[in-house]
Image: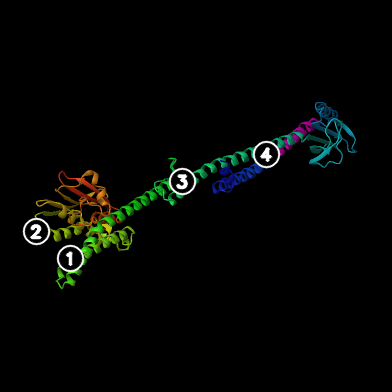
Amino acid sequence: MMEAWARLPRSTPFRLALTFAFLFMLAFVLSGAIVYQMMSADLAEQLDESIKETYSVVAATYSDSDLKELVETVQSHSMRNPKKEQLFSLTDAAGNRLAGNFTAAGLPDGFSLFGAEMPGIPPDTEYRAYSGSVGGNTLTIAFSLSETDELETIMLMSFGWATLIITGLAVAGGALLASRVQRRLDGIAATMVDVSHGRLDTRIPLTGNGDDIDIVSSQVNAALDRLSSLVDGMKQVSTNIAHDLKTPLNRLQMILEGAADKAAQDQDVSDDLADARAEGYQINETFDALLRIAQIEAGARKARFTDVDLDEILQIIAEIYTDVAEDDGKVLSSRQLKEAADRIHGDRELLTQMFANLVENALRHCPSGTTIKLSVTRQGDRVLASVADNGPGIPTDERERVFQRLYRLDHSRSTPGSGLGLSLVRAIADLHGASITLEDCRPGLAVVVSFPLVRSPAP
């Protein structure tokens, strides 16, 4: 735990959290400074309005040129301010005080600021004053800035504490969020380490909230599933190759040894050489099929994709294999798709080979009298191509295994074939983004390949 917290300052999520916290604090401080300036200006404006209003009220008592009433008014206001929060001064032309609680000396007309040192008030107390002439005399009204300064101080302290609190919360929240993200990244890293050590069943744990990390983790898990299945497939292929090729290689060796013995005795070895050549062809066909599947799975043929009419391909397959089926005591029929303009995007040669493999597979494993049907239908935005028969079918628990390379229902390998036909079909379907399902025809089996539709452009 301590090690995780020690690594936290170096982690990218924590640095991003600090960056966003700094930007947020910068925005908060700037906005606070603007608000402070606006409030300070508003307080100063309100203070000036109060001073000017008080000055007007006091000066109005001299409306009848009654100096005595003006003096009494100034003196009355002065007495109501024993703490001298407000100062009043009335002086004659010579600068002598006529009334008030202080003597304004040297202040200009209009608004001004001055510092006063008088008994009963703190030293250097600032006042905002307004001076004007009333009947040849000078009237000065001054209000203390202590209240305004106190409000500004409260504002500054509030912004300061708010800044400290928000900074602490931002850093703490960023650290918590960063540690949470870091734990999830550590989980991804640990999974990758396990996979690199050969534990291909390890998967990244998901939180289930559907965020970006969950989406990426799901994609990585899907890639690991694919990798695991490929590795398992390679292991199975290696085992099956060793099993399937051992017999023909031993048979080839025995044929060649027998031919060598006959040649030593000057006997005819042409039959043995023909058998050896047939075994060699069979071995080469197996390896060629494996290489072809690998090339298709690598996507090397996608550059040859064009718009293809599946209906046309199945008609060609039907024409080729109808006579073959009749010679084998079987019936092959086809049903066309009415919407001929609906096409798919793919490799014509590979699609032809895929459906040829499916038909050959049905001909090879179905008894005499079987009916094989080829059909193309539409289902929403998909085109479904089907090769169905009423033969023995495939057991339910074997339907997924038959797509594995070199897997055969005839485990004794007594019937001809390499066990790669349906593996090639699956590889071609995957290359075209198609799905394959094996359906029970009761009796028989239907292999249904579902392709995404490519619609013809509107005329």
- Can residue 260 be seen? yes
For image coordinates 80% across by 35% down, the residue present is: 142
Q: Which residue is mark 4?
A: 160
Residue type pointed to by label 2? Asp
Q: Nearer the viewer, mark 3 or mark 2?
A: 2
Real-space Cα separation, disc 3 to disc 4, in angstroms: 37 Å
Figure quadrant of residue 405? bottom left
Residue type pointed to by label 4? Gly
Note whether 254 is above or below 451 in the view shown.
Answer: below
Q: Nearer the viewer, residue 345 or 238?
A: 238
Q: Which residue is mark 3?
A: 213
For marks 3 and 2, the one nearer the N-term is 3
Q: Nearer the viewer, mark 1 or mark 3?
A: 1
Report the side of 275 relative to 299 (left or right): left
Direction bottom: furthest residue: 266
Real-space Cα separation, disc 1 to disc 3, in angstroms: 60 Å
Figure quadrant of residue 246? bottom left
